[in-house]
Each structure stands twice: as structure tokens, then as C-alpha cells.
């Protein structure tokens, strides 16, 4: 068992159909997490049946509910690591392998897109991470709980990008897994810089971090 809490968020009515597949992928991990937490605006019986804890807030008072629930769930975690993975993404079975050997603050993993294209985050210095106008890192990368306690997800549209910039500026120790850890359901053009580069308003917000 790996000393990690896996976290996801489900809200509204548009994402419920992703829950069974997400749970199946977690259950198929070769190494098991110590805890799984789902942040949501309602109780999901399938989560209860699979031993997943729920952090509930029926009416979150924020525009950006994903980072709100990620932070709320992370506050409940007691493990060394926290790994946020969106409900519509899917862990690869070996995702947790190698995590416990890491001493970095953030372990940057890669993702597969459309089941065929693989993306591995490029190696960047901290200065490059918080000054370059693009996001190069995948949202579903594990973070040490001790780092999240002092540097949580900003409640903005591109919360992961803002998180990487904020962490780099504060001196986080980034590590590179150099492996694909999960499958991403969107085209790569719709991920990371794809969305961010096409969204001037929310892009500016992320660049403030």
C-alpha cells in the first residue's frame, strides 16, 4: 500500500457517468492507495460501495468548483502524498509504482491522449516554469501533502497551471517520473496550453501566479 490519498471531484449532473470507469481504474492499480476521497455536492452510492470517502458541500460558494473540492479533500488527507485525478481521466495500472521512492515536492507524470499519443512533461527550471507563458505539466501529478498545506490550488479556471507557477515561484522541488501515469480523454489541443492559450481572460488570471 502506498502512502497516498487519491482525490477527485464530481459536481452537477454532467460527470456522474464517468464515476464507474474512474473507480475501476483505481481498483486496477497494481499498488493500492491508502485512502480515496471524492469531493462532491451530493452523495454517490457507488463511491460508498467502493470504500471511497466523500467530502460533501452541497452549495460551494465559488465559481471554480474543481480546485475548491481538491483543496477541501486535501485538507482531510493524512498521507505523505496527495494525487488529484479528474473524474474523466483514468489511471494506468502502474501509476503508483515508484512514488514512495521520491523525495521531491511534486512528481510530474505524463499522460496518454486518445489512447495513442503520449505526452511527457519537459524538464524545466523553476524560473522557466513561473515565467514562461505556457503550461507544460499535466494536472494529474502527485504532490506531497506537506507542500499542499502551504501552497494549495488557486481557485481559478486553470488551477493546475496556476499551482505549478505558484509552486515554482515558492521554490518547490520538482521531480520527473518520465512515464505515462494516466489516460486523458480529450485531444491534446484541448489540454493544458491548448485551452489556456485560447482563453485570454482566464489565461491572464493564471499568469498572475
Image: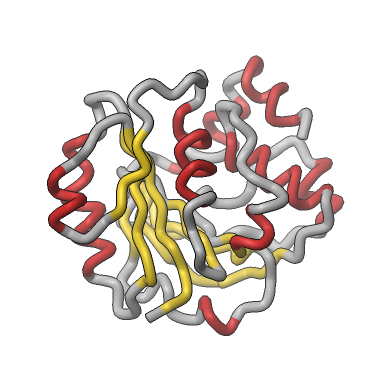
Most distant residue in the right direction: 127
Q: How many marks?
A: 0
Q: What colour scheme was applied to this rendering of the protein?
A: secondary structure
> At 54% across and 66% down in the image, what residue appears?
81
63 lies left or right of 130: left
Q: In which image quadrant can residue 124 be found? A: bottom right
Q: On the rendered image, what quadrant is the C terminus found in?
A: top right
Q: Is residue 35 above or below residue 137?
A: below
Q: Is residue 84 above or below residue 67?
A: below
Q: Is residue 11 visible?
A: yes
Q: Is residue 21 above or below residue 69?
A: below
Most distant residue in the bottom direction: 101
> At 79% across and 41% down in the image, what residue appears?
132
- Residue 39: give x, y in percent of width and height: 37, 41
> At 31% across and 55% down in the image, what residue appears?
90
Which one is nearer the viewer's eye here, 26 or 188?
Answer: 26
> At 50% across and 25% down in the image, what residue appears?
64
Q: Is residue 189 visible?
A: no
Most distant residue in the top direction: 201
Q: On the rendered image, what quadrant is the N terminus found in?
A: bottom left
49 lies left or right of 122: left
- Residue 38: give x, y in percent of width and height: 34, 47
Which one is nearer the viewer's eye here, 190 or 149?
Answer: 149
Which one is nearer the viewer's eye here, 209 or 45?
Answer: 45
Which one is nearer the viewer's eye here, 46 or 83?
Answer: 46
- Residue 128: give x, y in percent of width and height: 82, 50
Q: Is residue 159 above or below residue 75?
A: above
- Residue 44: give x, y in percent of width and height: 19, 41
Q: In which image quadrant can residue 33 be found? A: bottom left
Amino acid at each position: 500500500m502506498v502512502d497516498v490519498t487519491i482525490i477527485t471531484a464530481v459536481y452537477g449532473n454532467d460527470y456522474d457517468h464517468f464515476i464507474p470507469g474512474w473507480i475501476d481504474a483505481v481498483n486496477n492499480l497494481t499498488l493500492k492507495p491508502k485512502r480515496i476521497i471524492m469531493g462532491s455536492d451530493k452523495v454517490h452510492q457507488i463511491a460508498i460501495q467502493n470504500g471511497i470517502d466523500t467530502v460533501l458541500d452541497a452549495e460551494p460558494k465559488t465559481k471554480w468548483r474543481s480546485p475548491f473540492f481538491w483543496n477541501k479533500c486535501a485538507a482531510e488527507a493524512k498521507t505523505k502524498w496527495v494525487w488529484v485525478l479528474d473524474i474523466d481521466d483514468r489511471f494506468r495500472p502502474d501509476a503508483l509504482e515508484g512514488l514512495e521512492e521520491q523525495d521531491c515536492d511534486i512528481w510530474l507524470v505524463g499522460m496518454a491522449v486518445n489512447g495513442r499519443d503520449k505526452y511527457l512533461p519537459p524538464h524545466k527550471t523553476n524560473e522557466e516554469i513561473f515565467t514562461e507563458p505556457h503550461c507544460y505539466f499535466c494536472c494529474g501529478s502527485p504532490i506531497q501533502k506537506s507542500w499542499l498545506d502551504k501552497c494549495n490550488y488557486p481557485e481559478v479556471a486553470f488551477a493546475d497551471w496556476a499551482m505549478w507557477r505558484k509552486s515554482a515561484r515558492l521554490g518547490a522541488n520538482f521531480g520527473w517520473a518520465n512515464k505515462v501515469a494516466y489516460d486523458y480523454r480529450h485531444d491534446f489541443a484541448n489540454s493544458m496550453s491548448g485551452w489556456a492559450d485560447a482563453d485570454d481572460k482566464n489565461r491572464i488570471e493564471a499568469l498572475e501566479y
